[in-house]
Image (cartoon, grey):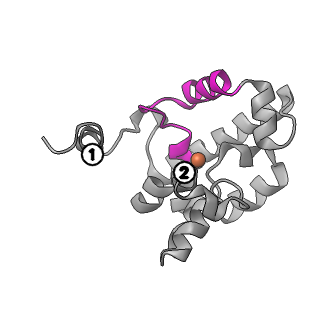
Amino acid sequence: MEAAALLHDVDKLAAVRPAVADLAHGSGSAEWLALRGHPELGEAIVGHPVSRLADGSWFDGWFARASIEALIVSYADKRAGQKLESMAERFASWERRYPPAERAARARGTWSPETLAAVRRRAESIEARVCDLLRVAPTDVRRLEWTSRAFRFAREGLT
Ligand SMILES: [Fe+2]
């Protein structure tokens, strides 16, 4: 699960994007990893993009069959920006960074206020299921201890 979480956005890298350019975000990451011998990571990755939550029928099918790993990767995506945030903070950040016109272009459709409300409800369903399965409250969620050291290493290298 940690490997899937760490690599879920790999298809955003300039070095990877051309190889999977015909695939939707997330599916591109899964395909790229499968081609490198890690097909087992795909199921936990393909459902993470928030844009997926705009499609109610897709979401219903995914939510009914998603593994706990897929649910956690999707949930983590909705809590982790540069730092751990509540889903409300994360959605506010997305809305600031991707104004409606850009969001519509990315989602290849229009996110009406009703769609945005449905996306938030579906994200809340993911949060509720994950927290129920793990018997934690959303406010109890924390980053794993090793992540602080890993972020410092990524920023500064070995010190
Ligand atoms: Fe992503």
User: Could one spot residue 67 in this view of the protein?
Assistant: no
Disc 1 beta carbon < 8 A from ligand 1? Answer: no
Tell whether 36 sits left or right of 47: left
Residue for badge 2: 14
- Magenta-drawn segment: 75-98
Quarter of image, res 96: top right
Instruction: Bin the neighbour count of mark 2 within 10 Å (Cα to Cα): few under 14, some 14-19, many 20 and up.
Output: few
Residue for badge 1: 150
User: For numbered disc 2, what is the local secondary structure?
Assistant: loop
Instruction: Bin the neighbour count of mark 1 within 10 Å (Cα to Cα): few under 14, some 14-19, many 20 and up.
Output: few
Amino acid type of disc 1? Ala
Tell whether 156 sits left or right of 107: left
**Furthest residue toward bottom:** 37
Tell whether 151 sits left or right of 46: left
User: Could you tell me residue 39's position as x and y percent?
Assistant: 54, 75
Write the residue at 41% across / 61% down. 3
Gap between marks 2 and 1, in whole Å? 22 Å
107 in relation to 90, above or below:
below
Upstream in the sequence, badge 2 or badge 1? 2
User: Could you tell me residue 98's position as x and y percent?
Assistant: 68, 28
Q: Number of callouts in the render?
A: 2
User: Could one spot residue 62 in this view of the protein?
Assistant: yes
80 in relation to 65, above or below:
above
Write the residue at 57% across / 43% down. 127
**CB within 8 Å, label 2 to label 1:** no
Decide which of 123, 137 is in the foreground and name it. 123
User: For numbered disc 1, what is the local secondary structure?
Assistant: helix
Whether 28 is among the magenta residues is no
Amino acid type of disc 2? Ala
- Placement of the C terminus among the 4 image quadrants: top left
